[in-house]
């Protein structure tokens, strides 16, 4: 990270300093790892303190947040400021261990129901992104792939990915546009494109809201992420244009997918292996 001029200025108190060799070797696609104090491994709920960047500047405020690796929609920015200010962090952690989160969309708010010593508790947590009123906050200005380890460090959730417009010079971007135009048509606006080598062939692939542009045998292909309007969650079927393999996953709304990795595969929604689909 330090050798790249575009990322050498990126630092964050929430990142693991000098990550262990085994972590770096198992997950070379991760440029930084967020430190998490796990509250409940089974629920996959933890606590983290980190910094945000907002439109090029570091926010002069430390985030105190719940990390909740919910299977529907993982989040890492549930605001714990008011509980910390009142000295109730440990008490709240105890209730989290005893209770359950309601089935809802955690990126908006999170409700905890718990019982202790015959007393029922209900806490509603909100998102830092809405509470701080800074909608463009990032962990690393989209210049790094920032990973959050699951308990046990056998899988990673991509909390943030490299964005094409933040890591590519204008000249290089035009070269990429010309190459994509030859194979798959016009590249979407660069600020909507995330860069990640999903099939581990040494050439970068490019994720957008509704698809993936990936390299295969010295050319590029486009795999669309289908979405049809329906009530509730949509069940989507991915089909590879290169090997014909298929996989089904669910999406709350267009582009709401998330990515994880076990070090050998990149998964969409922790289920479909984009690596297998693009081999």
Image: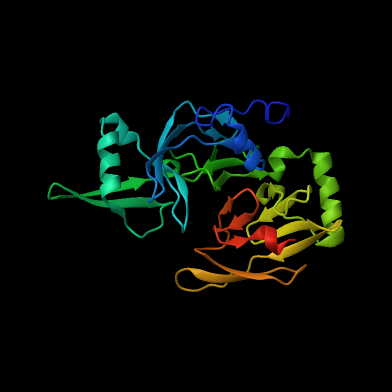
Q: Is residue 147 above or below residue 185?
A: above
The quadrant of the picture occupied by the N terminus is: top right
**Relative side of 266 to 50, left or right:** right
Which residue is located at x 71 percent, y 48 percent? 190
Choose between 2 and 41: the one closer to the eye: 41
Which residue is located at x 54 percent, y 57 percent? 270
Q: Quadrant of residue 217?
A: bottom right
The quadrant of the picture occupied by the C terminus is: bottom right
Choose between 47 and 64: the one closer to the eye: 47
**Relative side of 78 to 21, left or right:** left
Choose between 155 and 119: the one closer to the eye: 155
Q: Is residue 90 above or below residue 198?
A: above
Q: How is the image coloured?
A: rainbow
Q: Position of residue 89 (x, y in %)?
A: 30, 35
Q: Position of residue 79 (x, y in %)?
A: 38, 40
Q: Position of residue 268 (x, y in %)?
A: 59, 58
Most extreme residue toward the left, as rendered? 118
**Relative side of 97 to 203, left or right:** left
Which residue is located at x 64 percent, y 62 percent? 210
Most extreme residue toward the front, as rendered? 22
**Relative side of 65 to 207, left or right:** left
Specify whether residue 131 is in view: no
Specify whether residue 165 is in view: yes
């Amino acid at each position: 990270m330090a050798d790249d001029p575009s990322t050498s200025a990126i630092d964050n108190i929430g990142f693991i300093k000098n990550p262990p060799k085994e972590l770096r070797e198992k997950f070379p696609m991760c440029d930084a790892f967020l430190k998490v104090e796990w509250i409940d491994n089974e629920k996959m709920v933890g606590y983290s303190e980190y910094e945000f960047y907002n439109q090029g500047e570091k926010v002069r405020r430390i985030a105190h947040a719940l990390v909740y690796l919910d299977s529907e929609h993982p989040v890492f920015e549930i605001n714990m400021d008011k509980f910390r200010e009142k000295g109730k962090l440990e008490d709240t952690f105890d209730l989290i261990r005893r209770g359950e989160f309601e089935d809802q969309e955690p990126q908006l708010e999170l409700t905890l129901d718990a019982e202790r010593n015959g007393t029922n508790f209900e806490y509603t947590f909100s998102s830092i992104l809405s509470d701080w009123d800074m909608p463009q906050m990032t962990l690393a200005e989209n210049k790094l792939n920032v990973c959050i380890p699951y308990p046990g460090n056998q899988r990673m959730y991509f909390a943030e990915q490299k964005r094409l417009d933040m890591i590519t010079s204008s000249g290089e971007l035009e070269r990429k546009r010309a190459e994509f135009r030859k194979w798959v048509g016009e590249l979407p606006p660069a600020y909507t494109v995330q860069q990640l080598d999903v099939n581990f062939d040494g050439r970068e692939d490019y994720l957008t809201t509704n698809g993936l542009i990936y390299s295969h045998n010295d050319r590029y292909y486009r795999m669309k992420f289908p979405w049809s309007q329906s009530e509730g969650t949509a069940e989507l079927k991915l089909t590879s244009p290169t090997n014909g393999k298929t996989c089904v996953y669910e999406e709350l709304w267009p582009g709401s997918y998330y990515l994880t990795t076990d070090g050998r595969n990149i998964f969409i929604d922790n289920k479909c292996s984009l690596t297998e689909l693009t081999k």
